[in-house]
Image: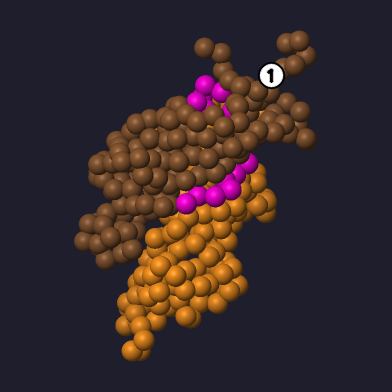
Amino acid sequence: MKYFEDIGIGERTVVGRHAFTADDIKAFAMRFDPQPFHVDEEAAGRSHFGRLVASGWHSAIVWMRLMVDERRRQEDVARSRGEPVVAMGPALGLRDLKWLRPVYVDDTIAYESEVIETRISESRPNLGLLTIRSTGTNQRGELVISFISTTFVERRPVNK
Amino acid sequence: MPKHHWEDFKLGTVTVYGPRLVTREEIIAFASEFDPQPMHLDETAAAATPLGGLAASGWHSCCLLMRIIADGFINGSHSMGAPGVDEVRWLKPLRPGTQVRVRATVLGTRASNSRPEIGFVNFLFEMIDDQDAVVTTLISPLMVRRRDTASQP
């Protein structure tokens, strides 16, 4: 796996894709974002959305789960080759999170992430900070979500 | 109680919503489902990370914040969702057993130029813990329906 020093600006990760079912959308929203247009088809039909839409937090957090799964696959490959497993996270936060279009029932969103900035942490000089832009695109090729996040990543040990 | 319109949100208003207790079980269950990194699942693994011990996923704090404000005022307003979030900062680890509240400050309001039926209310949301320390901040414009001025002279 790549240490901080090995990661370049512009590197992209195909994070994965997820199909949002009605049950999935409603179950998430009942727990965390119970607005009528996320939990009730009839109320959603009367709203400005016109039909049931996923909570924006739902479309964002699916990226996180898929990213963790992708990192695990990379870790497994590294272990099988006897290569080092590089630690990543936690993140410091997010900015410019944009919900560009609604995510409707049965939409499939494909997520990608791209490195846009790298720097050494001032507070923890033994760690690097990776800033990435992540996007989600629906099956019609329309961008539905975009955000920028900054996360810690392990630096290459000096004795290697 | 009638639902709030855009005109009811006033610049500088500060309101606190909650509290809500965040349990260890809830932190692990959320992380298992949405963010299964060891630092959100396991005390020993978490101790070796910058979090220095088990802490909730930052996304969990965002989702809890969303739920607290949905119950607090959004479902009592003519909410039309949000176009996004300008900024989220995870300032302090959210530990098991913390009772959180959300302090909402109206940073600004403006009418939509393109859609006369809605207005934006720009909020600073701060998730605060038992000691009033800020755990997470979130700045976001919410879209709220305006009063029907034609029917209310």
Based on the displayed image, in which of its 4 quarters is residue B24 positioned? top left
The single residue placed furthest to the bottom in the displayed view is A159
Residue pictured at 45% horizontal, 41% vertical: B126
Residue kind at label 1, given as amino acid type? Arg
Q: Position of residue B66 (x, y in %)?
A: 46, 37
Front residue (pair A119, B145): A119
Based on the displayed image, in which of its 4 quarters is residue B112 positioned? top right
**Span shown in magenta:** B73-89
**Image height check: is B8 above or below A88?**
above
Which residue has dot 1 on it?
Answer: B147
The single residue placed furthest to the left in the displayed view is B44
Applied colour scheme = by chain
**Image height check: is B77 above or below A97?**
above
Q: Which chain is orange?
A: A
Q: Callout 1: helix, strand or loop?
A: loop
Q: Position of residue B80 (x, y in %)?
A: 62, 30
